[in-house]
Amino acid sequence: MNPTGHASAGPGGPGAGLYGLLMGRAAGLPNDDLFARMLVSQTAGQGALPPGLGLGPAVFPTLVKRHFPGFHLPAALADPGLDGERRAERDDLLALLLESRAGQDLSELWMAEIVTAACMANDHLWQDLGLWSRADLTRLMLENFPALAARNDRNMKWKKFLYKQLCQQEGIYVCRSPSCEVCVDYAVCFGPEE
């Protein structure tokens, strides 16, 4: 069991066999391991990503083919879409991530879409993504969006950090404390993610 009380999709969990199959087909590209973890979790009903990791029917098969050649993963590829109210939020988050991508691999574009889709859910970002630990998410951010990740120099929770970045871009500062250390919500933003 993971800290949330759900069966773990990680090593030793019910998805361990699928993870091994995926990694046995991995192309040796950046993000193979992270995509495999997300796929295992999604197959186990964990995480909050829409079907096909939120990429939709035009892109998801391309990701699987590129990162796990010869592997056929059945997935419902419906694109549930977003209501207009959240569309602007989604677009802003996606733009923030795309501005900061490492520029090393095509998969960073897909990762930006996937992280954005997960931000629309309500749990910790690593859990919404179907990753197996916060360390997985930190690795994802450092490898795919290094300039943005470097700004999180005080280890703020990632989803809160991303939204704080959006607020700062717009010149919106909702915190009333002069610094995080004296804020009554310090534990909410910087505490452990379990």
Image (cartoon, helix red, strand yellow):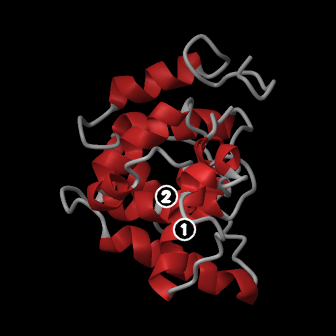
For badge 1, the amino acid type reads: Lys
Q: Is 127 on the left or on the right of 113, as rendered?
A: right
Q: Is 108 on the left or on the right of 61, as rendered?
A: left
Looking at the picture, tell me which residue is in the foreground, 184 or 75: 184
The quadrant of the picture occupied by the N terminus is top right
Q: Residue at x 57, y 68 (%)?
A: 163
Residue 13 makes an appearance in the image: yes
As drawn, which residue projects farthest toward the top? 12
For badge 2, the amino acid type reads: Phe
The quadrant of the picture occupied by the C terminus is top right
- Using the numbered discs, state the Cα–Cα distance from disc 2 to disc 1 in whole angstroms: 29 Å
Where residue 73 sits: x, y (%)? 54, 41
Where residue 110 sits: x, y (%)? 41, 61
Q: Which residue is mark 1?
A: 164
Looking at the picture, tell me which residue is in the foreground, 71 or 143: 143
Q: Residue at x 39, y 33 (%)?
A: 33
Q: Quadrant of residue 111?
A: bottom left
Looking at the picture, tell me which residue is in the foreground, 151 or 93: 151
Q: Nearer the viewer, mark 2 or mark 1?
A: 1
Q: Which residue is mark 2?
A: 60
